[in-house]
Image (cartoon, rainbow, N blue to C red):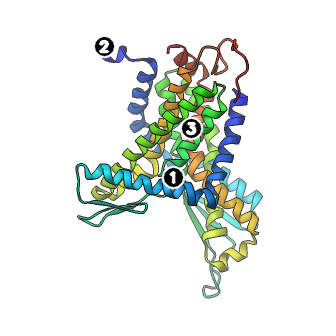
Protein backbone atom coordinates (compact mmCIF):
# COMPACT_ATOMS: atom_id res chain seq x y z
CA UNK A 1 0.00 0.00 0.00
CA UNK A 2 2.84 2.39 0.86
CA UNK A 3 4.55 1.54 -2.44
CA UNK A 4 1.30 2.25 -4.28
CA UNK A 5 0.96 5.69 -2.73
CA UNK A 6 4.59 6.62 -3.33
CA UNK A 7 4.37 5.59 -7.00
CA UNK A 8 0.97 7.29 -7.29
CA UNK A 9 2.24 10.61 -5.92
CA UNK A 10 5.37 10.54 -8.09
CA UNK A 11 3.32 9.78 -11.22
CA UNK A 12 0.78 12.43 -10.25
CA UNK A 13 3.46 15.12 -9.89
CA UNK A 14 5.14 14.05 -13.16
CA UNK A 15 1.93 13.93 -15.19
CA UNK A 16 0.69 17.21 -13.73
CA UNK A 17 4.05 18.87 -14.41
CA UNK A 18 3.88 17.55 -17.97
CA UNK A 19 0.36 18.93 -18.36
CA UNK A 20 1.58 22.41 -17.45
CA UNK A 21 4.28 22.50 -20.13
CA UNK A 22 3.50 24.85 -23.06
CA UNK A 23 3.84 22.02 -25.59
CA UNK A 24 1.24 19.78 -23.90
CA UNK A 25 -1.02 22.76 -23.30
CA UNK A 26 -0.88 23.72 -26.98
CA UNK A 27 -1.16 20.28 -28.56
CA UNK A 28 -3.27 18.34 -26.06
CA UNK A 29 -5.03 20.37 -23.35
CA UNK A 30 -6.29 23.28 -25.48
CA UNK A 31 -7.55 21.08 -28.37
CA UNK A 32 -9.24 18.79 -25.87
CA UNK A 33 -10.85 21.72 -24.05
CA UNK A 34 -12.18 23.10 -27.34
CA UNK A 35 -13.49 19.66 -28.29
CA UNK A 36 -15.19 19.45 -24.89
CA UNK A 37 -16.87 22.81 -25.54
CA UNK A 38 -18.08 21.60 -28.96
CA UNK A 39 -19.34 18.27 -27.55
CA UNK A 40 -21.16 20.05 -24.70
CA UNK A 41 -22.70 22.62 -27.05
CA UNK A 42 -23.78 19.90 -29.48
CA UNK A 43 -25.48 17.97 -26.69
CA UNK A 44 -27.23 21.12 -25.50
CA UNK A 45 -28.50 21.91 -28.99
CA UNK A 46 -30.44 18.63 -28.90
CA UNK A 47 -32.92 20.39 -26.58
CA UNK A 48 -31.87 24.09 -26.78
CA UNK A 49 -30.98 25.49 -30.19
CA UNK A 50 -29.79 28.85 -28.84
CA UNK A 51 -26.28 27.73 -27.91
CA UNK A 52 -22.97 28.10 -29.71
CA UNK A 53 -19.40 27.03 -29.02
CA UNK A 54 -16.44 29.21 -30.01
CA UNK A 55 -13.05 27.92 -28.96
CA UNK A 56 -13.47 26.90 -25.33
CA UNK A 57 -16.45 29.20 -24.74
CA UNK A 58 -20.07 28.06 -24.71
CA UNK A 59 -22.53 30.92 -25.17
CA UNK A 60 -26.26 31.43 -25.16
CA UNK A 61 -27.52 33.34 -28.18
CA UNK A 62 -30.69 34.15 -26.26
CA UNK A 63 -29.23 36.13 -23.34
CA UNK A 64 -25.51 36.38 -24.11
CA UNK A 65 -24.44 34.36 -21.06
CA UNK A 66 -21.22 32.45 -21.70
CA UNK A 67 -18.94 30.08 -19.83
CA UNK A 68 -15.30 29.52 -20.66
CA UNK A 69 -13.91 26.05 -19.87
CA UNK A 70 -10.68 26.70 -17.99
CA UNK A 71 -8.05 24.56 -16.26
CA UNK A 72 -9.66 22.44 -13.58
CA UNK A 73 -12.96 22.27 -15.47
CA UNK A 74 -11.82 20.33 -18.55
CA UNK A 75 -11.49 17.03 -16.70
CA UNK A 76 -7.79 16.78 -17.54
CA UNK A 77 -6.63 16.91 -13.92
CA UNK A 78 -9.22 14.33 -12.85
CA UNK A 79 -8.07 12.06 -15.68
CA UNK A 80 -4.46 12.52 -14.61
CA UNK A 81 -5.36 11.43 -11.07
CA UNK A 82 -7.12 8.35 -12.41
CA UNK A 83 -4.23 7.50 -14.75
CA UNK A 84 -1.72 7.82 -11.90
CA UNK A 85 -3.88 5.67 -9.60
CA UNK A 86 -4.32 2.90 -12.18
CA UNK A 87 -0.70 2.89 -13.30
CA UNK A 88 0.53 2.83 -9.70
CA UNK A 89 -1.74 -0.02 -8.62
CA UNK A 90 -0.37 -3.55 -9.12
CA UNK A 91 -2.39 -5.03 -11.99
CA UNK A 92 -1.81 -6.70 -15.37
CA UNK A 93 -1.19 -4.22 -18.17
CA UNK A 94 -4.23 -5.45 -20.08
CA UNK A 95 -6.45 -4.52 -17.13
CA UNK A 96 -4.72 -1.19 -16.78
CA UNK A 97 -5.32 -0.28 -20.44
CA UNK A 98 -8.98 -1.32 -20.31
CA UNK A 99 -9.40 0.57 -17.03
CA UNK A 100 -7.76 3.68 -18.44
CA UNK A 101 -10.00 3.69 -21.51
CA UNK A 102 -13.20 3.08 -19.54
CA UNK A 103 -12.14 5.48 -16.81
CA UNK A 104 -11.40 8.25 -19.28
CA UNK A 105 -14.89 7.89 -20.75
CA UNK A 106 -16.51 7.81 -17.29
CA UNK A 107 -14.67 10.90 -16.04
CA UNK A 108 -15.20 12.92 -19.21
CA UNK A 109 -18.87 11.92 -19.46
CA UNK A 110 -19.54 13.30 -15.99
CA UNK A 111 -17.45 16.34 -16.84
CA UNK A 112 -19.72 17.09 -19.81
CA UNK A 113 -22.64 16.95 -17.36
CA UNK A 114 -20.70 19.38 -15.14
CA UNK A 115 -20.13 21.84 -18.00
CA UNK A 116 -23.73 21.74 -19.17
CA UNK A 117 -25.14 22.01 -15.65
CA UNK A 118 -22.88 25.00 -14.89
CA UNK A 119 -23.92 26.65 -18.15
CA UNK A 120 -27.55 26.57 -17.06
CA UNK A 121 -26.88 27.22 -13.36
CA UNK A 122 -25.03 30.40 -14.31
CA UNK A 123 -28.04 31.66 -16.24
CA UNK A 124 -30.33 30.90 -13.33
CA UNK A 125 -28.42 32.04 -10.25
CA UNK A 126 -24.88 33.39 -9.92
CA UNK A 127 -24.42 32.22 -6.30
CA UNK A 128 -25.55 28.69 -7.14
CA UNK A 129 -23.16 28.74 -10.09
CA UNK A 130 -20.21 29.78 -7.90
CA UNK A 131 -21.01 27.17 -5.26
CA UNK A 132 -21.39 24.37 -7.78
CA UNK A 133 -18.39 25.50 -9.80
CA UNK A 134 -15.91 26.05 -6.97
CA UNK A 135 -16.89 23.38 -4.47
CA UNK A 136 -19.62 20.84 -5.29
CA UNK A 137 -18.58 19.72 -8.78
CA UNK A 138 -14.92 19.57 -7.76
CA UNK A 139 -15.85 17.05 -5.07
CA UNK A 140 -18.23 15.12 -7.35
CA UNK A 141 -15.67 14.72 -10.12
CA UNK A 142 -13.09 13.39 -7.66
CA UNK A 143 -15.75 11.11 -6.21
CA UNK A 144 -16.30 9.84 -9.75
CA UNK A 145 -12.57 9.13 -10.07
CA UNK A 146 -12.58 7.28 -6.75
CA UNK A 147 -15.61 5.18 -7.69
CA UNK A 148 -14.19 4.32 -11.12
CA UNK A 149 -10.96 3.27 -9.43
CA UNK A 150 -12.83 1.14 -6.86
CA UNK A 151 -14.87 -0.52 -9.63
CA UNK A 152 -11.68 -1.20 -11.56
CA UNK A 153 -9.92 -2.67 -8.51
CA UNK A 154 -12.89 -5.03 -8.08
CA UNK A 155 -12.39 -6.40 -11.58
CA UNK A 156 -8.76 -7.36 -11.01
CA UNK A 157 -7.94 -11.07 -10.99
CA UNK A 158 -7.51 -12.78 -7.58
CA UNK A 159 -4.16 -12.13 -5.97
CA UNK A 160 -3.90 -8.73 -7.62
CA UNK A 161 -4.82 -5.38 -6.22
CA UNK A 162 -4.48 -6.36 -2.60
CA UNK A 163 -5.09 -3.23 -0.53
CA UNK A 164 -2.79 -4.37 2.25
CA UNK A 165 -5.19 -5.91 4.75
CA UNK A 166 -6.01 -9.27 3.21
CA UNK A 167 -3.87 -12.35 2.61
CA UNK A 168 -0.69 -11.83 0.60
CA UNK A 169 -1.01 -12.05 -3.18
CA UNK A 170 -0.31 -15.46 -4.66
CA UNK A 171 0.59 -14.38 -8.16
CA UNK A 172 3.90 -13.13 -9.47
CA UNK A 173 4.82 -9.53 -8.61
CA UNK A 174 2.88 -7.19 -10.85
CA UNK A 175 4.49 -4.59 -12.99
CA UNK A 176 3.36 -1.16 -11.86
CA UNK B 1 -35.47 -0.46 1.52
CA UNK B 2 -35.62 -3.94 -0.03
CA UNK B 3 -34.33 -2.48 -3.29
CA UNK B 4 -31.43 -0.89 -1.45
CA UNK B 5 -30.62 -4.19 0.28
CA UNK B 6 -30.37 -5.85 -3.12
CA UNK B 7 -27.67 -3.44 -4.28
CA UNK B 8 -23.98 -4.26 -4.14
CA UNK B 9 -22.01 -2.89 -1.16
CA UNK B 10 -20.28 -0.43 -3.49
CA UNK B 11 -23.57 0.84 -4.94
CA UNK B 12 -25.01 1.27 -1.42
CA UNK B 13 -21.86 3.09 -0.42
CA UNK B 14 -22.07 5.48 -3.38
CA UNK B 15 -25.71 6.28 -2.61
CA UNK B 16 -24.82 6.88 1.03
CA UNK B 17 -22.00 9.24 0.01
CA UNK B 18 -24.38 11.22 -2.21
CA UNK B 19 -26.86 11.40 0.67
CA UNK B 20 -24.22 12.62 3.13
CA UNK B 21 -22.59 15.19 0.82
CA UNK B 22 -25.27 17.92 1.15
CA UNK B 23 -25.17 17.55 4.94
CA UNK B 24 -21.40 17.70 5.21
CA UNK B 25 -21.18 20.62 2.77
CA UNK B 26 -23.66 22.67 4.82
CA UNK B 27 -21.82 21.89 8.09
CA UNK B 28 -18.47 22.71 6.47
CA UNK B 29 -19.71 26.02 5.07
CA UNK B 30 -21.24 27.30 8.30
CA UNK B 31 -18.53 25.91 10.60
CA UNK B 32 -15.70 27.09 8.32
CA UNK B 33 -14.55 29.93 10.61
CA UNK B 34 -13.90 27.36 13.35
CA UNK B 35 -12.72 24.32 11.43
CA UNK B 36 -10.37 26.36 9.22
CA UNK B 37 -8.74 28.13 12.16
CA UNK B 38 -5.98 25.49 12.59
CA UNK B 39 -5.23 25.71 8.86
CA UNK B 40 -4.87 29.49 9.24
CA UNK B 41 -2.46 28.96 12.14
CA UNK B 42 -0.46 26.52 10.03
CA UNK B 43 -0.42 29.00 7.13
CA UNK B 44 0.80 31.71 9.49
CA UNK B 45 3.52 29.42 10.84
CA UNK B 46 4.73 28.53 7.34
CA UNK B 47 4.74 32.12 6.07
CA UNK B 48 6.39 33.52 9.22
CA UNK B 49 9.12 30.87 9.13
CA UNK B 50 9.62 30.83 5.37
CA UNK B 51 8.79 34.41 4.42
CA UNK B 52 9.14 36.32 7.68
CA UNK B 53 10.40 39.42 5.91
CA UNK B 54 7.24 39.56 3.73
CA UNK B 55 4.51 38.84 6.27
CA UNK B 56 3.61 41.13 9.16
CA UNK B 57 0.34 39.56 10.27
CA UNK B 58 -2.06 36.76 9.34
CA UNK B 59 -5.72 37.08 10.35
CA UNK B 60 -8.85 35.10 9.63
CA UNK B 61 -12.27 36.65 8.99
CA UNK B 62 -14.95 33.98 8.44
CA UNK B 63 -13.32 31.72 5.83
CA UNK B 64 -10.98 34.39 4.47
CA UNK B 65 -7.32 34.41 5.47
CA UNK B 66 -5.83 37.91 5.29
CA UNK B 67 -2.06 38.36 4.96
CA UNK B 68 -0.75 41.80 5.89
CA UNK B 69 2.61 42.19 4.20
CA UNK B 70 5.56 44.54 4.48
CA UNK B 71 5.29 45.31 0.76
CA UNK B 72 4.49 48.84 -0.38
CA UNK B 73 1.72 49.23 -2.97
CA UNK B 74 3.47 52.16 -4.67
CA UNK B 75 5.06 55.53 -4.05
CA UNK B 76 1.73 57.35 -4.32
CA UNK B 77 0.35 55.89 -1.08
CA UNK B 78 2.72 56.74 1.76
CA UNK B 79 2.77 54.30 4.68
CA UNK B 80 0.36 51.84 3.09
CA UNK B 81 1.12 48.14 2.85
CA UNK B 82 -0.18 45.38 0.59
CA UNK B 83 -2.81 43.05 2.05
CA UNK B 84 -3.74 39.78 0.38
CA UNK B 85 -6.99 37.96 1.11
CA UNK B 86 -7.35 34.26 0.34
CA UNK B 87 -10.65 32.37 0.37
CA UNK B 88 -9.76 29.22 2.31
CA UNK B 89 -12.99 27.51 1.21
CA UNK B 90 -11.39 27.06 -2.23
CA UNK B 91 -8.80 24.74 -0.71
CA UNK B 92 -10.89 22.98 1.92
CA UNK B 93 -13.85 21.45 0.06
CA UNK B 94 -12.07 18.14 0.59
CA UNK B 95 -13.17 18.23 4.23
CA UNK B 96 -16.89 17.67 3.49
CA UNK B 97 -15.90 15.15 0.82
CA UNK B 98 -13.81 13.18 3.30
CA UNK B 99 -16.54 13.40 5.94
CA UNK B 100 -19.19 12.12 3.50
CA UNK B 101 -16.99 9.19 2.45
CA UNK B 102 -16.23 8.33 6.07
CA UNK B 103 -19.81 8.56 7.29
CA UNK B 104 -21.06 6.55 4.31
CA UNK B 105 -18.57 3.74 4.96
CA UNK B 106 -20.04 3.30 8.50
CA UNK B 107 -16.90 1.78 9.93
CA UNK B 108 -16.84 1.11 13.71
CA UNK B 109 -14.24 3.79 14.51
CA UNK B 110 -15.59 6.53 12.25
CA UNK B 111 -15.10 9.38 14.78
CA UNK B 112 -11.40 8.52 14.98
CA UNK B 113 -11.20 8.33 11.16
CA UNK B 114 -12.89 11.74 10.92
CA UNK B 115 -10.38 13.22 13.36
CA UNK B 116 -7.40 11.65 11.57
CA UNK B 117 -8.66 12.84 8.18
CA UNK B 118 -9.27 16.36 9.48
CA UNK B 119 -5.74 16.65 10.86
CA UNK B 120 -4.25 15.05 7.73
CA UNK B 121 -6.03 17.53 5.44
CA UNK B 122 -4.91 20.66 7.30
CA UNK B 123 -1.46 20.77 5.60
CA UNK B 124 -3.12 20.43 2.17
CA UNK B 125 -5.42 23.36 2.97
CA UNK B 126 -2.49 25.42 4.28
CA UNK B 127 -0.54 24.56 1.09
CA UNK B 128 -3.31 26.03 -1.05
CA UNK B 129 -3.69 29.15 1.10
CA UNK B 130 0.05 29.88 1.26
CA UNK B 131 0.59 29.16 -2.45
CA UNK B 132 -2.33 31.48 -3.30
CA UNK B 133 -0.77 34.24 -1.17
CA UNK B 134 2.67 33.76 -2.76
CA UNK B 135 1.15 33.72 -6.26
CA UNK B 136 -0.58 37.01 -5.48
CA UNK B 137 2.49 38.85 -4.21
CA UNK B 138 5.10 37.13 -6.40
CA UNK B 139 3.37 36.76 -9.77
CA UNK B 140 0.05 38.55 -10.27
CA UNK B 141 0.68 41.74 -8.25
CA UNK B 142 1.76 44.93 -10.08
CA UNK B 143 5.46 44.92 -11.08
CA UNK B 144 6.43 47.44 -8.38
CA UNK B 145 5.09 45.02 -5.73
CA UNK B 146 6.52 41.85 -7.32
CA UNK B 147 9.98 43.45 -7.48
CA UNK B 148 9.95 44.03 -3.70
CA UNK B 149 9.53 40.30 -2.98
CA UNK B 150 12.96 39.52 -4.41
CA UNK B 151 11.77 36.20 -5.86
CA UNK B 152 13.96 34.86 -8.66
CA UNK B 153 12.51 33.51 -11.91
CA UNK B 154 13.03 29.94 -10.68
CA UNK B 155 11.29 30.72 -7.41
CA UNK B 156 8.35 32.23 -9.29
CA UNK B 157 8.12 29.09 -11.45
CA UNK B 158 8.06 26.99 -8.28
CA UNK B 159 5.35 29.21 -6.79
CA UNK B 160 3.29 28.87 -9.97
CA UNK B 161 3.58 25.07 -9.86
CA UNK B 162 2.80 24.99 -6.12
CA UNK B 163 -0.27 27.15 -6.71
CA UNK B 164 -1.53 25.06 -9.63
CA UNK B 165 -0.91 21.82 -7.73
CA UNK B 166 -2.46 23.26 -4.57
CA UNK B 167 -5.59 24.46 -6.35
CA UNK B 168 -6.21 21.89 -9.10
CA UNK B 169 -4.96 18.62 -7.59
CA UNK B 170 -4.41 18.69 -3.84
CA UNK B 171 -7.83 19.86 -2.55
CA UNK B 172 -9.60 16.95 -4.27
CA UNK B 173 -6.91 14.26 -4.15
CA UNK B 174 -5.85 14.71 -0.51
CA UNK B 175 -9.24 13.65 0.94
CA UNK B 176 -9.36 10.64 -1.39
CA UNK B 177 -5.89 9.54 -0.25
CA UNK B 178 -6.73 10.13 3.41
CA UNK B 179 -9.94 8.16 3.06
CA UNK B 180 -8.30 5.20 1.29
CA UNK B 181 -5.58 5.05 3.96
CA UNK B 182 -8.09 5.15 6.83
CA UNK B 183 -10.51 2.64 5.25
CA UNK B 184 -8.31 -0.17 4.01
CA UNK B 185 -10.40 -2.92 5.63
CA UNK B 186 -13.58 -1.43 4.15
CA UNK B 187 -11.99 -1.35 0.70
CA UNK B 188 -10.90 -4.95 1.09
CA UNK B 189 -14.45 -6.01 1.97
CA UNK B 190 -15.87 -4.11 -1.02
CA UNK B 191 -13.31 -5.72 -3.29
CA UNK B 192 -13.98 -9.24 -2.05
CA UNK B 193 -17.75 -8.73 -2.36
CA UNK B 194 -17.34 -8.40 -6.14
Left or right: residue B96 versus residue B137 is left
Quote the CA–CA distance across marks 1 and 3.
Answer: 14 Å
Q: Nearer the viewer, residue B61 or B96?
A: B96
Q: Of discs 1 and 3, which sits in the foreground?
A: 3
**Is the residue A119 above or below the residue B123 in the image?**
below
Considering the image in quadrants, where does the N terminus of chain B appear? top left
Mark 1 or 3, nearer chain start: 1
For the point 58% across and 43% down, the residue is A80
Q: Position of residue B51 (x, y in %)?
A: 74, 62
Q: Nearer the viewer, residue A51 or A70?
A: A51
Q: Chain of mark 2?
A: B
Write down the residue under mark 2: B2
Total count of labels: 3
Kindly state the secondary structure of the residue where label 2 is placed. Answer: helix
Residue A72, numbered circle: 1
Q: Chain of mark 1?
A: A
For the point 64% across and 69% down, the residue is B139
Kindly state the secondary structure of the residue where label 1 is placed. Answer: loop
Same subunit under labels 2 and 1?
A: no
Q: Position of residue A70 (x, y in %)?
A: 48, 58
Q: Residues within 10 Å of mark 2 (few under 14, many from 20)?
A: few
The answer to whether marks 1 and 3 mark residues whose Cβ atoms lie closer than 8 Å is: no
Q: Position of residue A147 (x, y in %)?
A: 49, 30
Kindly state the secondary structure of the residue where label 3 is placed. Answer: helix
Write down the residue under mark 3: A82
Q: Position of residue B4 (x, y in %)?
A: 34, 18
Quote the CA–CA distance across marks 2 and 1.
Answer: 39 Å
Amino acid sequence: MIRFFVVFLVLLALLFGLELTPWVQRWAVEPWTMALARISAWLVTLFDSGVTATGKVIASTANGFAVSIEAGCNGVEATIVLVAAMLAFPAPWKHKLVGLAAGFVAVQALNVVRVISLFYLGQWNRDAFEWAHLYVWQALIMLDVLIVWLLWVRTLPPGRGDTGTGPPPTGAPAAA
Amino acid sequence: MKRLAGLSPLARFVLAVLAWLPVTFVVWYFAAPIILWPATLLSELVTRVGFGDLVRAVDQHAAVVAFTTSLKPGQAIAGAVVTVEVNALLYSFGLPMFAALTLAAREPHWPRALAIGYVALLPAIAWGVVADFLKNVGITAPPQVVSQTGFTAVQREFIAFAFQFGSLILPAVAPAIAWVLTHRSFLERVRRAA
